[in-house]
């Protein structure tokens, strides 16, 4: 009997001992058969996650299995994986997708188990927070794998369970300025274009416990501190107040390692290591007076020249770090021009 292409891929996958070749075989299996033979592909991947010889790939396959599985499927598999240390981290999301609220009990139990892997306990708490809308993850890093033991809010999770596991309200999105929806001035139009670009990224991936890629209204306290330190050009001052970047990172070949555009909450601290030494509490020699760092690309600073303010704006300069002495070059004639460049990148 002739071997089907799917069966052949199945056999090759289990026989392969090279991780790179395994990855290509796995991708071919999913891309060629993941739609027309989804259940068969799921069975193959689940079989490998249970018994495959490349141990690290048994863990990596969990995200593919979760993506392929429909709600209600594979619940027994994910539940069993919860007891396997190498698979338990991703089994959390698999259980919630498969079982919904029926997964709450086992996941709360995992969160409370002091002998379980810290990362798996943290993942259970994080995923329960996202699924239920409860703020167990408030103020913590997006990746629960980096949470410290004292940050695991197990008591809150247990109290929530005792209260019947009610749904919460989640986190409200950051407040944004109305002009993003109806821009009129060049600054507003550039900000609105950048926000549309960021919105595409937010739709793909967003954690409102630690929101990223937003242009938000700055806090009055942050603006008070900034205005007490610097006299900003009108255009940049309005940008910070109305469209303050919140963890905005622009990935583009024009910017080395991507551009980090600073918001009002981080602008003062962003001067550390450039214009200011926070250890000695002194200005750093060799830094051009009046240069305010507003962004960086792989630590290469982009600065407004506050000594060259004209018509409510100022030019932007940049330089490569690590060259010994700063050698700045004019990058944009104004902040608005710089913002337009970023929005178009």
Image (tube, rainbow, N blue to C red):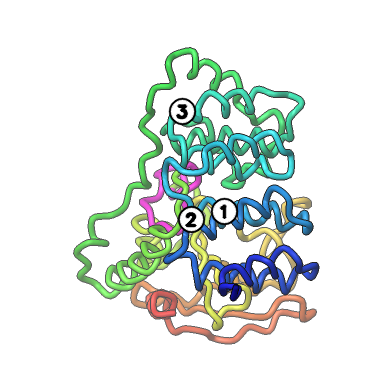
Report whether 201 appears left or right of 52.
Answer: left
The secondary element bearing badge 1 is classed as: helix
Report whether 311 appears left or right of 266.
Answer: left
Q: Which residue is mark 3?
A: 102
Q: Which residue is mark 2?
A: 39
Q: Which residue is mark 1?
A: 43
The secondary element bearing badge 3 is classed as: helix
Question: How crowded is the residue under tag 2: few (<14 C-alpha within 10 Å), some, or many (20+)?
Answer: some
Give the residue furthest to the top. 162
What is the distance, in whole Å, between disc 3 and disc 2 at their CAs?
23 Å
Disc 1 and disc 2 in contact, CB within 8 angstroms = yes
On the image, the x and y values in percent for residue 319 come to 64, 80
Report whether 99 appears left or right of 48.
Answer: left
On the image, the x and y values in percent for residue 172 come to 36, 40
On the image, the x and y values in percent for residue 165 come to 44, 21
Q: Earlier in the sequence, mark 3 or mark 1?
A: 1
Front residue of this view, candidates 44 and 97: 44
Q: Residue at x 67, y 69 (%)?
A: 23
Residue 291 in view of the camera: no
Q: Residue at x 35, y 65 (%)?
A: 195
Front residue of this view, candidates 17 and 241: 17
What is the distance, in whole Å, between disc 3 and disc 1 at their CAs?
23 Å
What is the distance, in whole Å, between disc 1 and disc 2 at their CAs?
6 Å
Q: Which residues are magenta?
A: 209-223
The secondary element bearing badge 2 is classed as: helix
In the image, is residue 207 above or below residue 193?
above
């Amino acid at each position: 009997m002739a071997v089907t292409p799917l069966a052949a891929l199945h056999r090759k996958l289990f026989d392969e001992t090279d991780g790179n070749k395994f990855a290509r075989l796995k991708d071919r299996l999913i891309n060629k058969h993941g739609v027309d033979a989804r259940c068969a592909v799921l069975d193959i991947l689940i079989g490998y996650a249970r018994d495959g010889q490349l141990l690290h790939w048994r863990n990596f396959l969990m995200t593919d299995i979760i993506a392929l599985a429909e709600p209600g499927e594979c619940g027994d598999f994910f539940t069993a994986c919860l007891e396997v240390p190498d698979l338990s981290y991703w089994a959390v999301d698999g259980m919630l997708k498969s079982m919904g609220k029926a997964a709450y009990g086992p996941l709360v139990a995992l969160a409370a188990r002091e002998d379980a892997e810290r990362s798996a306990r943290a993942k259970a708490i994080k995923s329960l927070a996202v699924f239920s809308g409860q703020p167990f993850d408030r103020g913590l890093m997006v990746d629960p794998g980096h949470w410290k033991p004292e940050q695991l809010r197990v008591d809150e999770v247990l109290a929530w369970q005792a209260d019947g596991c009610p749904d919460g309200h989640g986190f409200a999105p950051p407040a944004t300025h109305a002009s993003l929806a109806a821009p009129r001035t060049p600054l507003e139009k550039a900000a609105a274009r950048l926000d549309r670009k960021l919105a595409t990224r937010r739709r793909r991936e967003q954690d409102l416990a630690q929101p990223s890629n937003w242009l938000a209204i700055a806090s009055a306290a942050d603006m008070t501190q900034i205005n007490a330190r610097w006299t900003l050009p009108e255009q940049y001052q309005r940008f910070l107040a109305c469209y303050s970047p919140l963890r905005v990172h622009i990935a583009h070949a024009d910017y080395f390692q991507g551009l980090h555009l600073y918001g009002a909450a981080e602008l003062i601290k962003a001067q550390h290591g450039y214009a200011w030494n926070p250890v000695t509490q002194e200005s750093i020699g060799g830094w051009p007076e009046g240069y305010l760092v507003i962004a960086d690309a792989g630590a290469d600073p982009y600065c407004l020249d506050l000594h060259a303010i004209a018509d409510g704006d100022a030019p932007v300069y940049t330089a490569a770090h690590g060259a010994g002495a700063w050698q700045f070059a004019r990058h944009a004639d104004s902040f608005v021009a710089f913002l337009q460049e970023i929005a178009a990148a």
